[in-house]
Image (cartoon, grey):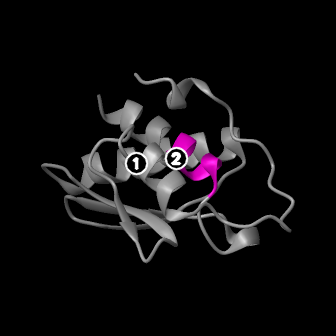
């Protein structure tokens, strides 16, 4: 578990700029195989041996999302869960997105 996963997401009120490339890269190295897409959102594909395991993971993310009040986009199908995270109020990445991604990684370890 890294230091990011120990932090709590804080409400973003908007009106601030999204993180820039240097800041994004500093956070990204703390995550486990997440991609940054167009400096706008984080993306990761998780694989599972069956539908039931993928669904259980989605449900765990849902519980975490409610606890952190930070809600990702989730697509899932048999054995696959794709998670996309960004801060909608600023239409880009915020520290909260990296905190949340780190907490998702902690579920899988």
* Other residues around mark 2 within 10 Å, as few (<14) / some (14–19) / many (≥20): many
Residue at (57% x, 63% y) in the render: 20
Is residue 41 located in the magenta-colored stretch of the structure? no
Q: Secondary structure at mark 2?
A: helix
- What range of the chain is rendered magenta? 94-100
* For residue 36, side relative to residue 50 (left or right): right
Q: Quadrant of the N terminus?
A: top left
Q: Quadrant of the C terminus?
A: top left
Determine which residue is flagged by label 2: 98
Residue 15: image quadrant is bottom right
Whichever of callouts 2 and 1 sits on the residue coming sooner in the sequence is 1
* For residue 35, side relative to residue 16 (left or right): left
Residue 12, given in percent of the width and then of the height, sits at 80, 55
Residue at (57% x, 23% y) in the render: 6
Q: Residue 28 got which mark?
A: 1
Residue 75, given in percent of the width and then of the height, sits at 39, 70
Residue 33, given in percent of the width and then of the height, sits at 26, 49
In front of the other: 12 or 71: 12
User: Pointer 2 and pointer 1: residues touching (CB < 8 Å)?
Assistant: yes
* For residue 76, side relative to residue 4 (left or right): left
List the single residue furthest toward the left: 49
Q: Residue 80 got which mark?
A: none
* Other residues around mark 1 within 10 Å, as few (<14) / some (14–19) / many (≥20): some
């Amino acid at each position: 578990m890294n230091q990011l996963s120990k932090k709590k997401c804080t409400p973003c009120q908007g009106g601030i700029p999204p993180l820039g490339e240097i800041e994004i890269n500093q956070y990204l190295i703390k995550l486990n195989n997440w991609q940054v897409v167009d400096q706008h959102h984080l993306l990761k594909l998780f694989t599972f041996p069956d539908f039931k395991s993928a669904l259980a993971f989605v449900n765990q993310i849902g519980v975490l999302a409610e606890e952190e009040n930070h809600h990702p986009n989730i697509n899932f199908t048999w054995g696959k869960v794709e998670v996309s995270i960004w801060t909608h109020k600023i239409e880009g990445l915020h520290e909260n997105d990296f905190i949340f991604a780190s907490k998702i990684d902690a579920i899988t370890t």
